[in-house]
Amino acid sequence: MQSKKWSLQIGGRILEVETGLLAGQANGAVTVRYGDTVVLATAVMSKSASKISGYFPLMVDFEERYYAAGKIKGSRFIKREGRPSDDAILSGRAVDRTIRPLFNHRMRNDVQVVLTVLSYDGENDPDIISIIAASAALSISNIPWGGPVAAVRIGRVNNELILNPVNGEVSEGDLDLLISGTKDKINMIECGSKEVPETDMIQALAFGQEAIKKIAAFLEEIQKEIGKEKSQPALVQGSDEFEAKVKEILLSEGLAEALYDKNKKVIEEKTKAIQEKVEDFIKNAYPEETDKLKEIAEIVFEEVSDEIVHQNVLEKEQRPDGRKLDEIRHIECKVGILPRTHGTGLFTRGETQALTVTTLGSPGDQQIIDTMEVDMKKRYIHHYNFPPFSVGETRPMRGPGRREIGHGALAEKALVPVLPEKEDFPYTILLVSEVLSSNGSSSMASTCGSTLSLMDAGVPIKKPVSGIAMGIIVGKDKKFKILTDIQGLEDHYGDMDFKVAGTDSGITAMQMDVKVDGVTLDMLKAVLQQSHQNRLEILEKITAAIASPRTEMSQYAPRIIIMKINPDKIRNVIGTGGKIINEIIDETGVQIDIEDDGSIFITSPDEASAGKAKEWIDNLTHEVKAGEVFNARITRIMNFGAFAEILPGQEGLIHISEIADRRIEKVEDVLKIGDIIPVRVKEIDSQGRINLSAKAVTKIT
């Protein structure tokens, strides 16, 4: 196929889409360039149904390549890129969450979308380019899909919205908003912000949607020009007669009633019994097609359940657990429940429970982030664990998956804006959230638990943060109802999962996924207005448990002493080959971190050791001034005087005329090496040499 290019001016730069040059055997392949960042997207679909059953098998892989940024990473022995970084996983999730809702959920062909970053300019974000590239590849391919979609990033500096800001503008501003969607709707949001009010957030979403509309129309024109005819997918589908019979059994056996109970376990037991009735019907009526028809029956079960929940919410405002649409489940907050940890917070909302533990460490415990995009250090880290027992299941525990990394990143993002500055609180802060029970919105429970845990640990956060998961039910007539604090069943059968976290002043983090083609700005405005009130309610529960950060840290938390020295004196502390600093560490048992600006952080489990190390460093770096008195040790004797050490590594000269208040012929007549005598600093000459006087302090005979 011959290479062909299209271009669009967006955000002050050219967005260029090219096809026909690379990856010719994929069903669809494009390269998208924005600035000097280039992403290759390929989309491939299997010709037949997957062997995987139970869900649509879509795989999205985001591949960072260090060569894209001109970097060679890894150890001396291994240079091949290994498992994806957390940032790469989050980027892949953003693409997946954007494109997945636009596939037919009954489709069973394997579909794989691979995004490979070929060039990175350090300014233009590969995330938004990858979403656009995936959309373009799917659109021009023969893969049945409901796109195109587009994505933009919105920043704000000095209250001015910026479309697709470069990296510097993101760090300087108070908003980092990634949104994607179709020409008319938004279907994915990822946001970190510094207490941005809801009204300002709506303005930013509207600003971004205008650009999305323009990019989506641009991709639509490319699809019309070169797009392949869509093929017929392998669908999980039975005869109209069979599906109607399954639906009849589900309703007659009381599925509508079974879905409505306050207890998650009761719902599971009742629905399982109904599903067993359907399986018995299939075994008796279709003994030779049991396995195939069971999967079709499962899809019918999901669709009928979805229809029941939608109808009850839209027509009766009836939720499965009996709550009002804007009602939050019962909340309990506890702190300080573990004896030896530095801080703990236990947050329980309904059947969802998260235990978050804070550990404080030295500045040297910071995490080094070394990826294609950034080389940096993180002093605030949040890990999220979701063990199988939290949902009453058994499965191998093999470390965090994409979901755990995504939820951890969201909870981390929510608290970053309220953390104290490093100069005021230099600790490295590690939070680990253990989800002990889950029935919806465990990431927001982790966020609330983080606030409790940080305050319990004595971390002087600026304000407490709470989070809430909101849902929406949209009818065929486009009317909708907002659901507050969605539980698992409402998440599963609802049309949106919108997580919002923030303080009483504004939003610090947002994340949205949908199961429909998207939601409108009017819907988002209603959700944000309701979520604001709900967050305030949760904040009241949090502050009732602990009103403010503790004034004293745990006795088991390390203590840090901060010092500031002349940067020129750093070498005095480190010594040749690290000899001096290692001696201090070995002698006192402390940990010492030194920064280029002369900041020194002494971390110790006890104040006595830290004080000893501080005194040692004070002596090593003391700026000697004229008139100061020291007990000096004679180190060398010359015919014109004696050199004496007044501080570790700092010597001065006692001229022979300054040794005593009488004339002496030989220095050795009065002093010998090792003598300790009091001296006064007479002067420091223009070359920094220290001149001492012994006779100015006391008489030496």
Image (tube, rainbow, N blue to C red):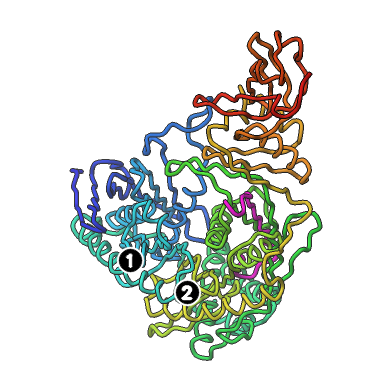
Q: Is residue 273 left or right of residue 669?
A: left
Residue 42 vs residue 283, the one in the foreground: 42
Tell me the kind of residue under disc 1.
Glu
Left or right of residue 240, residue 503 in this image: right
Q: Position of residue 676 (x, y in %)?
A: 77, 23
Q: Tell whether 248 sits left or right of 198.
A: right
> Spatial distance from mark 2 to mark 1, Cα to Cα?
32 Å
Residue nearer the viewer, 329 or 543: 543
Relative image position of residue 437 (x, y in whole percent): 69, 66
Q: Is residue 427 magenta?
A: yes
Instruction: Identify which residue is drawn at 28% across, 65% down.
Output: 211
Q: Which mark is residue 435?
A: none
Which of pointers 2 and 1 lies earlier in the amino acid sequence? 1
Neighbor class of circle 1 (other Cα within 10 Å; few <14, some 14-19, many 20+) is few
Q: Given this view, does label 2 or label 1 mark the residue nearer the observer?
A: 1
Q: Which picture quadrant has residue 331?
A: bottom right
Is residue 245 in sight in this rendering? Answer: no
What mark, if any, has residue 495 been given in the picture? 2
x 45%, y 55%: residue: 58
How many marks the image carries: the answer is: 2
Which residue shows up at 71% across the image and 31% down it?
Answer: 630
Name the mark on residue 160: 1
* Residue 156 vs residue 8, the one in the foreground: 156
Highlighted magenta segment, given as a residue range: 423-442
Residue 610 point in image, percent of width and height:
73, 42
- Tell me the amino acid under the disc marked 2: Asp
Q: Crowdedness of circle 2 by 10 Å Cα count: few (<14), some, many (20+)?
A: many
Point 57% across, 70% down: residue: 467
